[in-house]
Image: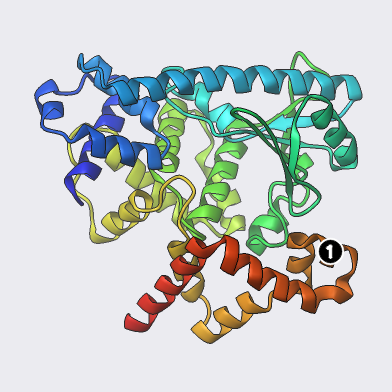
Amino acid sequence: MNTVYKDLIYLLSCSVNGITPDADRIKSMDLDKLYELAKKHTVRGAVCIALERAGIKHERFHDAYKKAVRKNIYLDMERAKLLSEFEKQEIWYMPLKGSVLKDIYPENGMREMADNDVLYDQEYQEKVRDIMTAQGYSVEHFGKGNHDVYHKPPVLNFELHISLFGEQHAEPLFRYYSDVRKLMKKDEGNSFGYHFSDEDFYVYITAHEWKHYSGGGTGIRSLLDSYVYITWKGESVDWKYIEKQLRQLEIADFEQERRQLAIKVFSSAETPELTESEQAMLMNYLTAGTYGTVEKRVRNKLAKQSKPSYILHNMFPSVKYMRESVEFVDKIPALYPVGIVYRWGRIVTKRRKVLSAVVKALKKKDKA
């Protein structure tokens, strides 16, 4: 593990545990390299707080932290506005992921948010689209997959979910959450808002993390989220219940390894002694970035299928996939062959970086 990775982990540990970092150690750090790594993992706010506790103000980190605070406030205001409209329209809803997680961190802005995730009643999907467009949002993605995407400049993004997992995701996850209402608890103080119990929220964020970890990967922020949640809840949650649910989801082993790693890595400012498997897992987090990488996604898929099968599947994806990704195929499925050619052209002309990453991963597979 290189020095900048160690520096990032050290400062994140100090940040979430209320520790003042060693100013002399910080002076030896390459803060510009650290900034780029923290940006990749969406943890600049947490690093900034640690730096400023030690009396060190770095302009780029400070600006990023201020923007994170402003964005969190802005997203909270917009979410409240939307949920108020849901109340008026009698649409049930449940905020998800970062909008909940950020409030358990010790300080505002320590946990950055990219967007607002909300689960809501699928029966009102078109009405919700009308609500969003009336509030000035553009529709970036609608009616394909398990969530719709809306954007309003400069920084407002919503992912509005009609389900937590779709058929394209791992079958145990899709099956377990197919009837999510049975897990939801009614809020106090409103008529249509819901939330998960502490146990079910932890199970969900673990399942969501696994989806990314086993796909394109996920960054160190996910591991930090886990540590903060475990630390915050401590012994107050029913771990036997959690383990039972994770067994149904077939991710109990992943959760146990992830939890042990998170505690080892973040519970102390000292560099932990890790086993070989723990080091490998930590490097998976550190090298992925917040949203993973194409190379990791390809590598994980090749671990489950042969290279020829992978290439064939990607050159000629299913009709269902094509209907979700190409509008004219969705309207006229018989145009699937034309859609395939259109997709190839789109990849070559507009997604060359993605194509290059896929080719690179395939070449590495040959050398392995």
Q: How is the image coloured?
A: rainbow
| Towards the viewer: 356 or 307 | 356
- When asked about the image quadrant of residue 62, the answer is top left
Q: Is residue 355 left or right of residue 171?
A: left
Q: Quadrant of residue 202?
A: top right
Who is closer to the viewer here, 231 or 226?
226
Looking at the picture, how far across and down is residue 155, in whole percent?
Answer: 59, 29
Up/down of 313 relative to 212, above or below: below
State left or right for residue 200 relative to residue 193. left
The residue at which mark 1 appears reads as 328
Q: Position of residue 105 (x, y in %)?
A: 44, 23
Is 113 left, or right, of 193 in this rendering? left
Q: Which part of the image, by quadrant, shows the C terminus? A: bottom left
Residue found at x 90% / y 34%: 127
Q: Secondary structure at mark 1?
A: helix
The kind of residue on which mark 1 rests is Phe
Vertical placement of 12 versus 242: above or below? Answer: above
- Residue at the (69%, 23%) spot, across then down: 79
Q: Nearer the viewer, residue 157 or 91?
A: 157
